[in-house]
Amino acid sequence: MGSINIVEERPLPLKLHFLPYPAPGHMIPLCDIATLFASRGQHVTIITTPSNAQILHHHKSNHSHNLHIHTINFPSQEVGLPDGIENLSAVNDLANTYRLHRATMLLQRPVQHFMERDPPDCIIADFFYPWMDDLANKLRVPRFAFNGFSLFAVCAMESFHSHSAIHGLPHSITLNATPPKVLTDLMEPLLEVEVKSHGLIVNNFAELDGEEYIQHYEKTTGHKAWHLGPASLVNRRTEREKAERGQKSSVVSMHECLSCWLDSKEPNSVLYICFGSLCHFSDKQLFEMACGIEASGHGFIWVVPEKKGKEDESDEEKEKWLPKGFEERNKMKGMIIRGWAPQVLILDHPAIGAFLTHCGWNSTVEAVSAGVPMITWPVHDEQFYNEKLITEVRGIGVEVGAEEWTLIGYVERKKLVKRKRIERAVRRLMDGGIEAEQIRKRAQELGKKAREAVQRGGSSNTNFEALIDELKQLRDFKSHD
């Protein structure tokens, strides 16, 4: 008898279309997640605009055969923006922020045209595109939402807009400020459309949000959340790729300079200070910050995007935001970076002992992944909610005591956070002592859990495999429909 060859059919890869919102906190993690799908053999297309496509070049390099970037023109002229301004990080006033957001809404037609010509098996789109709901229904494909927040923050937002105060969460939470009405008015309809999607993709791991919040979310909304992060850990990266995450220009020389400088410091002896790409402070607030940092007596790396390109400013200009002689007195102890820094690499360095942060979710989850405790100074968006997850729920940070919640990060704030508060918060974590050691230990334990979550058998990795299975079942069900 002749032998029978049975050829096992390999399942067809999924065809996935990703649509990120052009702001660093949304775009970087969603494109990391897109790259994860591509690395597992799925066919991924990221739809973006020419300027943003340049930022994403390194995502494509690793998985170019499975990951494609489709560019559509950004309607700058229609909304009165200069050509090339296609990302929130490129604007620094409220009027241009609105123009940029309006331009993103005009992407509906070209996105629809592309997807109708080439329908995917699934759409994963930022929740800032509510029109995606109608398009997915029209194409009869599942849509998953992404918002760049922690699930804890989403639960808090849902609870707040239901009750005008936070009630009914697994922990008793008291916010330090009230969200601006314009923010809650913006979020409410977006969250309503979000829960109409097939599920919510979360840049976090289940152990940080907590099973109690996952259950609370699913019970109160009837919607499923998929924890697939931390996005900064899900793809194996070279040092260079880590250094260039979210930034197209080469920063290798800066990385080498930082490594040399940090390598000379004791473990846990340096404070890292960074408020992301969308938070800008007045000179008065920067002056208070400088005084508080110096008074604490600890080493520091301070990222000051407000002063990008102003390396040669006069002494008179400099003294508006730095005490006289600050750089000279601290030249061995501190480093000021005007502009952008390779944050993932810095946080991973053993010399970093704490992170003074605005609690943006990307920054928060990167700090947790590195096991670094935080000093929290929220400014805008959902950051005041994240602060409570860090300090009250997980106990991996201390609060500066910021009490002014703005819609965006570069509007002038009325209340100064004074130097004494800043010094006290820095000392509380960096001076040592029982409380600081307990906070550091909890942060390091969560860092270990973050790394385990993305490994085989970890919570995020298991979720990812289950999501691929579900998407394939949805596709096969549709093909038999």
Image (spheres, helix red, strand yellow):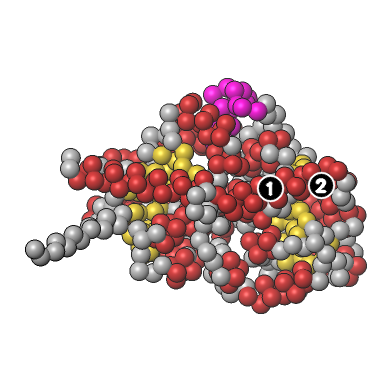
Question: What kind of element bears circle 2?
Answer: helix
Q: Position of residue 2 (x, y in %)?
A: 10, 65
Q: Position of residue 267 (x, y in %)?
A: 80, 62
What amino acid is found at the position of numbered circle 1 in the picture? Glu
Horizontally, residue 155 falls left or right of residue 393, namely left
| Of the pair 474 and 320, the residue shown nearer to us | 474
Q: Residue at x 83, y 42 (%)?
A: 435
Q: Which mark is residue 437?
A: 2
> Seen from this angle, which residue lies furthest left?
1
How many marks the image carries: the answer is 2
Q: Position of residue 450 (x, y in %)?
A: 60, 50
**Image quadrant for the N terminus?**
bottom left
What amino acid is found at the position of numbered circle 2 in the picture? Glu
Segment colored magenta: 152-171
Q: Which mark is residue 322?
A: none
Per the image, is 160 magenta? yes
Say whether disc 1 or disc 2 marks the residue closer to the N-terminus. 2
**Image quadrant for the C terminus?**
top left
Q: Residue at x 68, y 61 (%)?
A: 348
Q: Can residue 26 be seen?
A: no
Q: Decide: few, some or many residues near mark 2? Use Cα within 10 Å; few <14, some 14-19, many ≥20.
A: some
User: Which residue is denoted by mark 1 in the rendering?
Assistant: 445
Up-down relation of residue 133 to residue 16 (above or below) = above
Question: What kind of element bears circle 1?
Answer: helix
> Seen from this angle, which residue lies furthest front?
1
Q: Position of residue 248 (x, y in %)?
A: 54, 69
| Of the pair 64 and 88, the residue shown nearer to us | 64
Q: Residue at x 82, y 60 (%)?
A: 269
